Amino acid sequence: MNSNLDRLLTMLTEQADLIDKIHNRSNLFYKSTYRLVLDHGKPYCDRITPSPFRGKVKQCYKNCFEPLWKRKDWYYCEGYAIDDDLNLAIAHAWLINDAGQVIDPTWRDNISGAVYFGVAFENEYVFEIAKITKCYGILENDYLNGHKLMTQGFPAHALHPKFHEVMVGE
């Protein structure tokens, strides 16, 4: 396994375990987005450079939302990412193509060792949540949707079936 991916998964697990220990709100099935992403996410380590387009710095959610209207062959992802120089897991959004390759319009092309761990959403779900929350981004804005992801997990139509197994009963 990729050493940065190992590092990222270790960081996410440590954060999730810590929050699980101290969080005592019994109505939440998932105590943190770390745990939610760990339970449902997958690694994305194959990044296309240079990126086919460049977005604005520190606007990853917007940078990845807007192209979905024109590019039906790109899929919106959220989760966490690191590179060789980052020592903490950054909440982040990126796009993937049909082959699962990362298209990251926000991070510079010359960073080394970038790895991503997260979930790929159905584009219609991304639009649905943006309409409800009036914000870019899904995981970090779950509170604007009544904490539905933290209390119920992902609805059956949220995750893209090409990149995530659909569980029986969903």
Image (cartoon, rainbow, N blue to C red):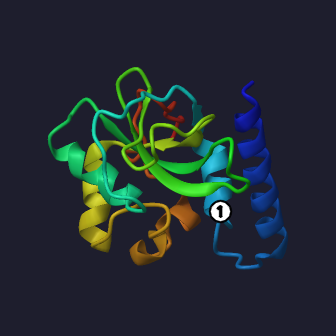
Amino acid type assigned to the residue bearing label 1 in the image:
Tyr
Q: Is residue 7 above or below residue 150?
A: above
At x 50% / y 72%, what residue is drawn?
Answer: 147
Q: Nearer the viewer, residue 67 or 29?
A: 67
Q: Residue furthest left?
A: 70
Residue 44, position as x, y percentages in the image: 55, 32
Q: Nearer the viewer, residue 28 or 88?
A: 88
Residue 61, position as x, y percentages in the image: 37, 58
Q: How many marks?
A: 1
Locate residue 57 relative to residue 66 in the image: left or right: right
Residue 101, position as x, y percentages in the image: 44, 26
Picture quarter with the N terminus: top right
Q: Is residue 32 above or below residue 26?
A: above
Q: In which quarter of the image is residue 39?
A: top right
Q: Nearer the viewer, residue 2 or 85?
A: 85
Q: Is residue 118 above or below residue 166?
A: below
Locate residue 86 relative to residue 49 in the image: left or right: right
Q: In which quarter of the image is residue 18?
A: bottom right
Residue denoted by label 1: 30
Q: Which of 157 and 93 is in front in this view?
A: 93
Provide the secondary structure element on which disc 1 rests: loop
Q: In which quarter of the image is residue 48?
A: top left
At x 72% / y 52%, what residue is drawn?
Answer: 12
* Residue 111 in sight here: yes
At x 48% / y 67%, what residue is drawn?
Answer: 148
* Residue 170 in sight here: no
At x 39% / y 61%, what residue is drawn?
Answer: 137
Q: How crowded is mark 1: few (under 14 residues within 10 Å), some or many (20 or more)?
A: many
